[in-house]
Amino acid sequence: MLVRHATVSDADAVTLAQVRAWQKAYAGIISDGYLAALDPVARAQWRRSILTEPERVTATFVAVDGDAVVGYTDVGPSQEGQEAGEIYAIYVHPDHWRRGAGGVLMRAALDHLTADGPRPVRLWVIEANQPARRFYERHGFVTDGAVRVEEFASTPITEVRYTRPAGA
């Protein structure tokens, strides 16, 4: 499994990984209708804009298995302040779950966010997404008490914030 910086040509594969991961991981959490309506082709244009406007995220990394992009992570400064880094997204296509892609993406994200020295790294996760929460905990993240509610298809979804302490 290889990790590299994403390019605009990765947009279709990145959005396919995200949409399929959402559809599997969030089944029973977010409405089936909302998940079924997610369209990787339509979302690819939005992804291209992120990859061509580097000020939107500091870096996007992709996990590559052979020639196939199987997952990605978006990282940058914390939305709550510059003292911490943040993993905005980390998704792997479900066909590649538990094959190491998530781990190599997490290492790339953490290496990038702490390249200038130790600092905390944060991320938000849907509270009901227990597999993702266990993954983050294995990588040294702990819940820090922050909670927010996002709406998906008019349904409030609770998210909890995880922080990996500086130097962890």
Image (spheres, rainbow, N blue to C red):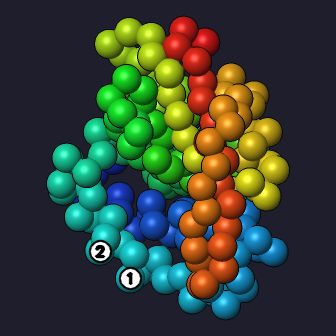
The image position of residue 1, as x and y in percent, is 56, 36
Residue type, mark 2 in image: Gln
Q: Quadrant of residue 115?
A: top left
User: Is residue 41 visible in the rendered structure shown here?
Assistant: yes
Residue 42 numbered mark, or none: 1
User: Is residue 62 visible in the rendered structure shown here?
Assistant: no
Residue marked by disc 2: 45
Frontmost residue, 38 versus 94: 38
Residue type, mark 1 in image: Ala
| Badge 2 density bin: few <14, some 14–19, many ≥20, Cα 10 Å | some
Proximity of marks 2 and 1: CB atoms separated by less than 8 Å: yes
The image position of residue 63, as x and y in percent, is 50, 43
Element on which disc 1 rests = helix
Residue 75 numbered mark, or none: none
Please give the count of numbered marks on the rendered protein: 2
Frontmost residue, 127 versus 55: 127
Q: Tell me the residue at 74%/54% (across/down).
A: 127
Where 164 sits versus 79, above or below?
above
